[in-house]
Image: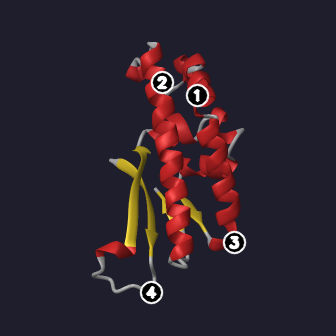
């Protein structure tokens, strides 16, 4: 199972394939192994709520966007923190021990943050009522 970010254009025809944006947000295990970690909570408390499910309303879009930029810019630091604490996390199970895998994790974090930023742009352009991640 994977996590995804969803945004609907409420005013569009339900059969319109351009009316929904769906992008990846990680594997189901990332709820706790990435989004629910202290490394994430300390930088982006709103995004750490992905550990359960996150629903972002239009009045929260600005703060959500700001936190996505923080995560995008701090991806390497977050990945390093997760590796430092790997004995306590799912990353130990994955055996992501070499530097190339740490770099790959940072790239994943950046990709997810950028997917969220794309969702904000889409939601604003379509006057969407919600961004959901789960």
Residue 76's disc number: 1
Q: Residue at x 46, y 39 (%)?
A: 30
Considering only order in the chain, which callout, 3 or 1, is on the residue closer to the N terminus?
A: 3
Gap in Å between the C-alphas at discs 2 and 3? 34 Å
Q: Is residue 122 above or below residue 49?
A: below
Left-right relation of 88 to 22? right
Considering only order in the chain, which callout, 3 or 2, is on the residue closer to the N terminus?
A: 3
Name the residue tied to disc 4: 11
Name the residue tied to disc 2: 103
Label 2 close to label 3 by CB (< 8 Å) = no
Considering only order in the chain, which callout, 3 or 4, is on the residue closer to the N terminus?
A: 4
- Disc 3 is placed on an element classified as helix
- Disc 2 is placed on an element classified as helix
Gap in Å between the C-alphas at discs 4 and 1? 39 Å
Left-right relation of 8 to 15? right
Q: Residues within 10 Å of mark 2 (few under 14, many from 20)?
A: some
Q: Quarter-wise, where is residue 15 in the image?
A: bottom left
Q: Is residue 129 above or below residue 33?
A: below
Label 2 close to label 1 by CB (< 8 Å) = yes
Q: Quarter-wise, where is residue 101 in the image?
A: top left
Q: Foreground: 5 or 52?
A: 5
């Amino acid at each position: 199972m994977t996590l995804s970010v969803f945004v609907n254009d409420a005013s569009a025809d339900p059969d319109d394939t351009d009316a929904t944006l769906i992008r990846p947000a990680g594997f189901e295990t990332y709820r706790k192994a990435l989004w629910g970690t202290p490394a994430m909570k300390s930088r982006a408390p709103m995004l750490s709520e992905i550990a359960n499910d996150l629903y972002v309303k239009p009045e929260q879009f600005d703060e959500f966007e700001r936190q996505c930029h923080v995560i995008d810019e701090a991806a390497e630091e977050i990945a390093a923190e997760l590796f430092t604490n790997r004995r306590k996390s799912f990353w130990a199970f994955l055996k992501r021990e070499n530097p190339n895998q740490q770099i790959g994790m940072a790239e994943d974090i950046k990709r997810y943050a950028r997917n969220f930023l794309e969702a904000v742009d889409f939601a604003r352009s379509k006057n969407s009522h919600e961004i959901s991640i789960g």
